[in-house]
Amino acid sequence: MTSDEIELKTLMLASQRGDAASHGALLAKLAPRLRGYYKRRLIGAGRSAEEAEDLVQESLLAVHLKRHTYDPGALFTPWLHAVARYKLIDYLRANKMSRMNVPIDDRNDLMAADDHSSTESTHDMAKLLGRLPRKTRQAIEAVKLEGNSVAETAARYGMSESNVKISVHRGLQALASFIRRDRDA
């Protein structure tokens, strides 16, 4: 087990027990790793590295909201890689790039290098989501975190499919805006 694995797993286990400081430290340590991972993948797909930030935020949000699904007896980095990989696949599908091969066995690449080019976010994702209107929050949780389709989400919450898409898009923009404002404050 690498020292990164031990450190991240320790933080995740403390986070699962409700230790807010450990949870913030975990998210802060994951942000640059995720950012570097996504930038390499997006550039490899002929996309802009700037697109990585949305994926970083979605992944941190997923780690926050789904941390209860992590099995304490398992390694942490494969679980994190699965979260990151699925977020990338979802993003590429939504952006007509679904033919890109995202290998399942490249989890070590996630831990290979940090990317410190952007400010690391240590925001509590639940509080950020709580600042959104209820319908917007529900749409983001259902589509981006639970992996439901737009059609399923629309039926579940009595919204049109276009309303779900607009809510998710605007909600992600609002989350990014909240983070920028909080960081600059």
Image: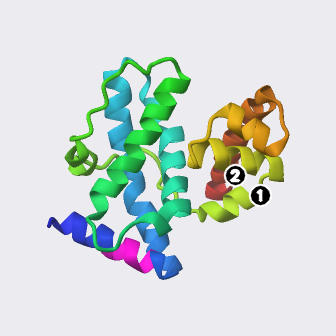
Horizontally, residue 46 falls left or right of residue 105, namely right
Magenta part of the chain: 10-15
User: Label 1 near label 2: C-beta < 8 Å?
Assistant: yes
Q: Position of residue 148 (x, y in %)?
A: 61, 41
Mark 2: secondary structure = helix
Q: Nearer the viewer, residue 57 or 64?
A: 64
Amino acid identity at mark 2: Phe
Asked if 150 appears above or below 62 in the picture, the reply is above
Residue at x 53% of width, y 48% of height: 57
Horizontally, residue 55 falls left or right of residue 30, namely right
Q: Dot 1, how many residues are within 10 Å of its Cα: few (below 14), some (14-19), or many (20+)?
A: some
Tag of residue 178: 2
Indicate which disc, 2 or 1, sits on the residue closer to the N terminus.
1
Asked if 93 appears above or below 174 in the picture, the reply is above
Residue ID for mark 1: 131
Residue 144 position by quadrant = top right
Q: Nearer the viewer, residue 7 or 92?
A: 92
Q: Is residue 163 visible?
A: yes
Horizontally, residue 31 falls left or right of residue 65, namely left
Q: Position of residue 91 (x, y in %)?
A: 50, 31
Tag of residue 11: none
Q: Nearer the viewer, mark 2 or mark 1?
A: 1
Residue at x 39% of width, y 57% of height: 30
Mark 1: secondary structure = loop
Q: Quadrant of the C terminus?
A: bottom right
Q: Nearer the viewer, residue 17 or 121?
A: 17
Q: Nearer the viewer, residue 17 or 8?
A: 17
Q: Dot 2, how many residues are within 10 Å of its Cα: few (below 14), some (14-19), or many (20+)?
A: some
Q: Position of residue 72 (x, y in %)?
A: 34, 73
Q: Is-magenta flag for residue 27?
A: no
